[in-house]
Image (cartoon, grey):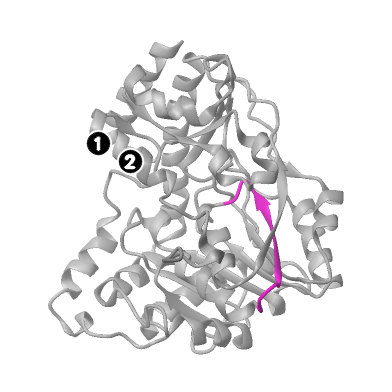
Amino acid sequence: MTAPLASRLRGFGTTVFAEMSALAVATGSINLGQGFPDYPGPPEVLDVARAAIGTGADQYPPGPGIPELRAAVAEHRQRFTGQAYDPDTEVLVTAGATEALAAAMLALLEPGDEVVLFEPIYDSYSASVAMAGGVVRPVPLHPPAASSPTSPAAPWTFDEAELRAAVTPRTRLLLVNSPHNPTGTVLTDDELAVLAELATTRDLTVITDEVYEHLVFDGARHRSLATLPGMRERTLVVSSAGKTFNVTGWKIGWVCGPAPLVTAVRTAKQFLTYVNGGPLQPAVAAGLGLPDAWFAGIARDLQRRRDVLVSGLRDAGLPVIAPRATYFATVDVRGVQPDGDGLAFCRALPERVGVVAVPTVVFYTPEHAALGRHLVRFAFCKSDAVLGEAVERLRRLG
């Protein structure tokens, strides 16, 4: 019998998140590997979902999403970016950002089409491209030196020559994740200008993953690539409720973009989940309408949690690249793992100190794996008690 898995998906086995989460359970360790909060979202959101269960919202919602949520997405986008989107034709509700990205790849790629994207790469991207028969063309983000206690690190950045060299006549899509998982970097205006110029001159369609749009620290500013001149008409913006409202299990995401691109994504999406999360959609609509001060407050709170973890990691002898956004901090393990093997470090860490992390090497393609071999990602989207205990355990490494 031949191998049952299609050749395009070979190499995409069980994720490292599953391995590390199983290690956490088996060893009773604190799981700082997977990026999910362990504290609830806002009652203004949760109470609406509770009230919707047991009503007509339990049944199939409309294929594009309930009108209230599509309107809320459009209003939220207008409020925070100044861009107007028609909720009837330019907004689509999806089963999280993951489905939005997969549906976009299936809708827009022909076999052999290339997708340029930055690595380290969030793991679903490469799989989505492969399922659509596309080809990943990775461009490395290069890390800065680890930050000091008094000075935040410079951002990770790309080499413009490497970016331009990655674009070929077969390139169809440019996939941009900013704020970026796993590095926590936020692309600057100058970097966004380079991407916009490249996309327009090479006639590329752009997909932006902006799920961490509100979780930005230290005065950094997230700017959507779609807001640059000439970019709205070629860009699909993807975001979701999970990270903003601490409801990662709800899987309510959305796509905003010009009607022809959104229609293409909807054509693929309707044969994936069709619809999802009926009682959760009105709750997310309520959340998107929360005041500006609430969104600023969640960033301040998460920045405080970041600072607690970063301090503990430094005390443990792990140089930190302090993130400007997201849930994650990256460390260089060579000071406590002489061979620089981040995967081996993560597999041993639960027994050593009772903490789980994720090796950054899994976010790289084989050709660039050496760039991430010595790096490890820790999540700080955890309660004060859990973070405090994790920091105490990690300090045993120092």
State the image coordinates of residue 243 (x, y, percent, origin top left).
42, 54
State the image coordinates of residue 237 (x, y, percent, origin top left).
58, 69
State the image coordinates of residue 134 (x, y, percent, origin top left).
64, 69
The quarter of the displayed image where residue 49 is located: bottom left
Query: At 38% across and 68% down in the image, what residue appears?
Result: 252
The quarter of the displayed image where residue 163 is located: bottom right
Residue that numbered label 2 is attached to:
21
The residue nearer to you, when weighing 318 against 363, is 363
- Which kind of residue does numbered mark 2 sit on? Ser
- Which kind of residue does numbered mark 1 sit on? Val
State yes or no: residue 180 in magenta. Answer: no
CA separation, marks 1 and 2? Answer: 6 Å
Q: In the rendered view, would you say 1 is above or below 324?
A: below
Region of the chain picked out in magenta, as a range: 110-121
Q: In the rendered view, would you say 142 is above or below 313?
A: below
Q: Residues within 10 Å of mark 2 (few under 14, many from 20)?
A: many
Query: At 43% across and 74% down in the image, what residue appears?
Result: 94
Query: At 69% across and 50% down in the image, what residue appears?
Result: 187
Query: How many numbered discs sit on the rendered protein?
Result: 2
Report the quarter where the N terminus lies.
bottom left
Q: Residues within 10 Å of mark 1 (few under 14, many from 20)?
A: few
- Which labelled disc corresponds to residue 236? none
Is residue 102 visible in the rendered structure shown here? yes
Q: Are marks 1 and 2 in contact (CB under 8 Å)?
A: yes
- Which labelled disc corresponds to residue 25? 1
